[in-house]
Amino acid sequence: MTTPGRRSAPLVVIGSGPGGLAAAQSFREHDATSPGLLISADPDPPYARPPLTKDYLTGESERSELWLAEEKWFADHAVSLRLGTEVVALDRAARLIRLDDGTTQPYDRLVLATGSRAQPLPVPGGDDPELILVRDLASGERLRELAATPRRVVVIGSGFIGCEAAASLAVRGADVVLVTGEDVPHLSRLGADVGKRLAGWLRDAGVHRAGGGFRPEARQRRCPDRRVVADG
Ligand SMILES: Cc1cc2nc3c(=O)[nH]c(=O)nc-3n(C[C@H](O)[C@H](O)[C@H](O)COP(=O)(O)OP(=O)(O)OC[C@H]3O[C@@H](n4cnc5c(N)ncnc54)[C@H](O)[C@@H]3O)c2cc1C
């Protein structure tokens, strides 16, 4: 049953990342008047994630520089934002989506731009709320707050996000240990030569590396009261 009072929107986009925003913007370029609706589980309006482990973390840029579109754009272009709302079911036959507040939203066209999620650490204790799983603005802000006071931080994962977070935290004066199962970062993806160079840059930035994979008992023994940053 359709929620009373909710009109069908010609375009509904699920996801407020760059993909969802680009879909809404390009819809607007091709249809100047029909209303659009962008629904996202994220409570913040569309923002850039890359700075969260780079200049935003080092303190070289501010929250106001993260937005991918000005608030005014949405009002001027008849695209409504429904943030902090998760889509929990899709009924294509009825052209309806169901939202986590129990209401439904009809649509004519639907774009799924739901992106990806960071992988929680698959070990006992991996769901500890003290861990920061870096993916969204809220986690980026927690990380930045953490960086404001120099301390020891363990970064788990030597992919792009882990290496960037480690280097940026070291720039902020943290004592950073990067935990990785790889001999050098990005070994499998970029090869040994690039990996060695990245390892050198991280070393020069002051990042210590612990290799050989992540062992939860080692974490508990060595840093019982320190925060751990995980990426996915
Ligand atoms: C810290 C960090 C640094 C990065 N740095 C770089 C970089 O330097 N270069 C680069 O190219 N890429 C980088 N990336 C990756 C880049 O941010 C992603 O590729 C990009 O965000 C993908 O955009 P997207 O719109 O496809 O999905 P996402 O940005 O993941 O957005 C998906 C959206 O869908 C919403 N959503 C998902 N499920 C639901 C649901 N059921 N109901 C409602 N909403 C839902 C989410 O809340 C989210 O808003 C980085 C990512 C991170 C986290």
Image (cartoon, rainbow, N blue to C red):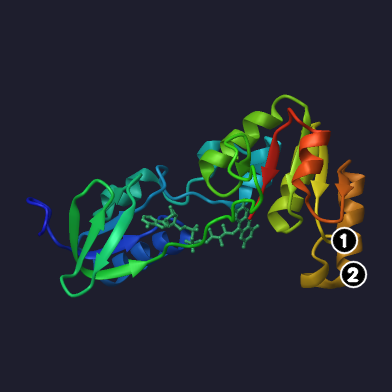
Q: Left or right: 103 with respect to 82?
A: left
What's the mark number on residue 28?
none
Tell me the quadrant of the picture where the N terminus can be found.
bottom left
Does the residue tagged 2 have its C-beta within 8 Å of any atom of ligand 1?
no
* Residue 60 vertical position relative to residue 197 in the rendered view, above or below: above
- From the viewer's perspective, is residue 14 above or below residue 142? below
Q: Secondary structure at mark 1?
A: loop
Query: Crowding near pointer 1: few (<14 within 10 Å), some, many (20+)?
Result: many
Q: Position of residue 146 (x, y in %)?
A: 67, 30
Q: Nearer the viewer, residue 173 or 69?
A: 173
Local secondary structure at mark 2: helix
Which amino acid type is shown beneath numbered disc 1? Val
Q: Which mark is residue 184?
A: 1
Depth check, front residue: 42 or 155: 155
Which residue sits at x=52%, y=39%?
138
The residue that disc 2 covers is 192
Q: Residue at x 65, y 46 (%)?
A: 124
Circles 1 and 2, Cβ within 8 Å, touching? The answer is yes
Earlier-in-chain disc, 1 versus 2 = 1
Crowd band around label 2 with a 10 angstrom C-alpha radius: few (<14), some (14–19), many (20+): some
Quarter of the picture containing the C terminus is bottom right
Residue 205 picture location, percent across and down: 87, 43
Seen as rendered, the residue at the extreme left is 4
Q: Is residue 196 above or below residue 215?
A: below
